[in-house]
Amino acid sequence: MVAQLKRVANNELLVSIALISIVSVLAYALLLPKLGLYVDDWYMVWMGHSQGTSGLIAGYSIDRPINGVFNALSYNLLNGNLLLLHIYLLAQPG
């Protein structure tokens, strides 16, 4: 076990990626309760609230049909809760 930890610690690239990831997550996670809606979040929440998940799918059907399905699923799962939305976005890769 100690030998494996030393091998990982000697890998500078892996340690650098891990450290940058941890700092980024911590910096963003501390602000989660204070974050609001930005740019395209407003109309997505409005579509989901006023038209439901079918409105979200229809709204994205022209240029991003798969994105509409994923947004509808996530909106349905999160019930429009902003804190849950930001936690969900933090956990998403990329």
Image: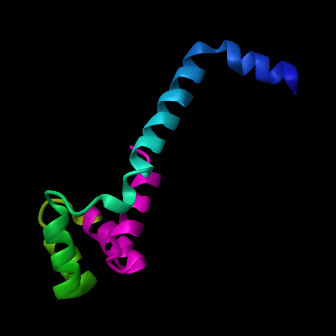
Picture quarter containing residue 18? top right
Relative to 80, say whether 90 is above or below. Answer: above
Q: Residue at x 53, y 21 (%)?
A: 16
Picture quarter containing residue 75? bottom left
Q: Residue at x 16, y 87 (%)?
A: 50
Residue 6 position within the rendered picture, expressed as x and y whole percent measured from the top left: 77, 17
Residue 41 position within the rendered picture, expressed as x and y whole percent measured from the top left: 20, 64
Relative to 42, say whether 51 is above or below. Answer: below
Q: Main secondary structure of the magenta part?
A: helix
Looking at the figure, which quarter contains the N terminus? top right
Residue 19 position within the rendered picture, expressed as x and y whole percent measured from the top left: 54, 28
Relative to 28, say whether 22 is above or below. Answer: above
Looking at the figure, which quarter contains the C terminus? top left
Residue 56 position within the rendered picture, expressed as x and y whole percent measured from the top left: 21, 76
Q: Residue at x 37, y 52 (%)?
A: 31
Left/right placement of residue 84 relative to residue 6 reads left
Relative to 41, say whether 28 is above or below. Answer: above
Residue 61 in view of the camera: no
Picture quarter containing residue 68? bottom left
Q: Which residues are magenta?
A: 67-94
Q: How is the image coloured?
A: rainbow
Q: Is residue 75 part of the magenta span, yes or no?
A: yes
Q: Is residue 85 part of the magenta span, yes or no?
A: yes
Left/right placement of residue 62 relative to residue 4 reads left
Task: Please tell me how many numbered marks the rendered image carries.
Answer: 0
Q: Residue at x 23, y 65 (%)?
A: 65
Residue 71 in view of the camera: yes
